[in-house]
Amino acid sequence: MSKYFRRKLFIYVLTFFLAVTIDWLIPRFMPGNPIQVLIARANLKAESAKVVYSYYMRAFGLDVPIWNQYANFWNALFHGDFGTSLWLFPQPVIKIILRAVPYDILLLLPAILLSWFAGNKFGAFAARSKWLDNTVSPLGYVLTATPYMWLGMLLAWTFGIVLRVLPFSGAYSYALMPTLSWIFIWSLLEHWILPFVSLFMVMFGGWAIGMRNMIIYELEADYSHYLETLGAPRRLIRRYAFRNALLPQITGLALQLGVIVAGALVTEIVFSYPGIGYLILQAIQNHDYFLLQGCFLFVIIGVLLANLAIDVTYVLVDPRTRTGMQGER
Amino acid sequence: MSLQVDDLTLYYQTLHGDVKALEGATFSVADGEIMGLAGESGCGKSTLANGLILLKPPMRFVHGSVRLDDEELPVWDTDRMDAFRFRRISIVPQYAMNALNPTRKIGKMTVELLRSRKVDVRSTLPELERRLDLVGLSHEVLGMYPIELSGGMKQRMVMVLSTLLDPSLLMADEITSALDVSTQKAVARMLVEFRDRRFVKSLMVITHDLSILNQIADSILIMYAGRLAEKGSTDRIINAPRHPYTRLLIASLPKVGVRHRQTRLTGIPGSPPFLLHPPVGCRFRERCPAALPECGEEPPFVEIEKGHYVACWRESGTDAEA
Ligand SMILES: Nc1ncnc2c1ncn2[C@@H]1O[C@H](COP(=O)(O)OP(=O)(O)OP(=O)(O)O)[C@@H](O)[C@H]1O
Ligand code: SF4
Ligand SMILES: [Mg+2]
């Protein structure tokens, strides 16, 4: 068992190392010099531009050899330093990201968890009868096939522009400052509804369809047929099928939770919701490579943690993985 | 009479039409009898067994009747059949290796199954353990997941489970084919032991392997392409077969009963007909070395001597040569 986890851990560390290295490489080998962009925006004279340029190069640690930069990068990383943003210079990247993360969690955690629960329940329910299946399943397919962006715009248009009942831009009213007041919380909630609903609906369709298909597959599995020949009631057979069908859904859930910090890129853009997804867009538009790098780093960490969680969960719920480990001892 | 099947006809519904997998099956299994059921792959052996216990789409009941211990068995009504399943009729399915829920401990699954069937668990568990001892499984298997058992162990577990409530009839579908020769023998002996101890009243043993049947079966039923070809005592079938198909089968065996080599039913030229559009008349006609003009009509399954039935024009009517 411990050997199994040691090996897993080694793979995770290796993956992390490689992913972070690639994350570091990409901005450096992308065309265009970010400092130049920054200076160009400031509209300086040629001589002063030169001074400012060398100042910035030093400030961003770009004046040392490339391998040195790489070592410094890791060193800074272990001190929680993700570098400085160009777009919001001189704010540190980590601060900008940490400011955005709560919005992602606020939006995605409920959307993922609730759609997972509701979708699985609903899918299992649909697998139960032909009649339900014929009505519910097509709905699920339509929902999953709907692009987030399209549904988002549809909702924004219907409730924000036509009916004028809900705001559809930002995380709270632009007239407010974040404070712990009822007005602010109310505004937060109002702005949260549309992006939440658009995420929930699309994800719900996916979970429901997945569950329905898995259950039908499990009900046709040999062990289900054998129980039928033993006269076991439908209830018992369905319970087993549900449990076994849930395993792949757990994997899916963990993966979704892993990319939670990446935000819901498209949805956040449609609703100008200031999560990481929105930040990524801003970072790209403003050639802010350090911010982009920081965002991706968050995504990497999130995905790896989620996978680790899956591995551990599987060991707990699926005996097949457990015996696999015994064989390795 | 433990089991009495009359004119049982079962089709599979497919997009291309009905697959006539079993037609006009009429036979009986006496109390205490071990009946072997043999025939080439695809001749309808599993269809017959499944039809008796779990008849569900795409399988379709066409007509026929089944009696178990002189009581009508409502094979076409899956809800009413539930009362008979497990308690009166059971199967060790062809897929026994995958028959147990992979994510439940075997003991837990057994308890849940028994509870759901309203069987008193407390009084049944000691019997379960006794039977595990009998088939050489340690009680620890109850705390294990199916994947922790070898194929042979799973098979024995399923055998014990299927017979736990002492059914009148147990159908064992190809339970020896995935095992090595010595394990095959052990499993075959177990079946006899189960009968001798009255765990099951009678048995239907489905196999390709006639040498196994020669060792354990009291009678043998030979099927060909969805129809019964011949039924008789093991001795008569092995030593004095009357149906041309049975004769070819027996002849293709290397020294029946002496050698225990894995013997497959091969070596008859040609292949069985497709059951979507089976030929009219005798279904064996295309491959039969002894075909007659009248074979274009369906031969009846008739008793040519006590307990020996044959469906062949050469045997019915005139007294044919032995
Ligand atoms: N679900 C199904 N749908 C359509 N046809 C089927 C189905 N199951 C079986 N058949 C057909 O019914 C016929 C009898 O099949 P069956 O499984 O009873 O054969 P078998 O004698 O048990 O063969 P084997 O020795 O390979 O197990 C075959 O021709 C097969 O193609
Ligand atoms: S009925 Fe005719 S074709 Fe069929 S087995 Fe007998 S002799 Fe052969
Ligand atoms: Mg079969």
Image (cartoon, coloured by chain):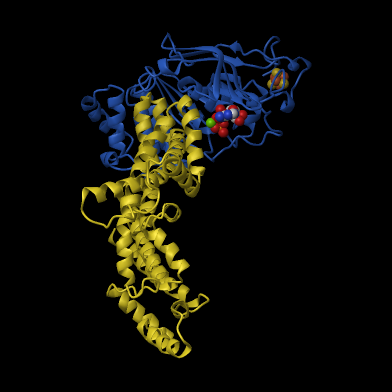
Chain colours: A yellow, B blue
Q: Tell me: A88 left or right of B260.
A: left
Whether A229 is drawn above or below A199: the answer is: above
Numbered-mark total: 0
Between B279 and A238, the one nearer to me in the picture: A238
Q: Tell me: B96 left or right of B123.
A: right
| Figure quarter occupied by ligand 1 | top right
Residue at the right extreme of this rendering? B293
Between B11 and A162, the one nearer to me in the picture: A162
Q: Which residue sits at x=34%, y=29%?
A: A236
Q: Quadrant of the N terminus of chain A?
A: bottom left
Where does the image place residue B97, in percent across and percent down from the top left?
Answer: 43, 39
* Residue A291 in view, yes or no: yes
Q: Which residue sits at x=50%, y=23%?
A: B56
Whether A22 is drawn above or below B231: the answer is: below
Residue at the front extreme of this rendering? A175
Between B152 and A312, the one nearer to me in the picture: A312
Q: Tell me: B313 left or right of A137.
A: right
Toward which corner of the image does residue B203 lie, by quadrant? Answer: top left
Where does the image place residue A126, in percent across and percent down from the top left?
Answer: 43, 31
Between B320 and B295, the one nearer to me in the picture: B295
Q: Tell me: A182 left or right of A145.
A: left
Q: Which residue sits at x=34%, y=48%?
A: A191
Toward which corner of the image does residue B268 lie, by quadrant? Answer: top right
Where does the image place residue B208, in percent across and percent down from the top left?
Answer: 55, 33
Where does the image place residue A60, in percent across and percent down from the top left?
Answer: 37, 81
Whether B249 is drawn above or below B31: the answer is: below
Q: Quadrant of the C terminus of chain A?
A: bottom left
* Residue A318 in view, yes or no: no
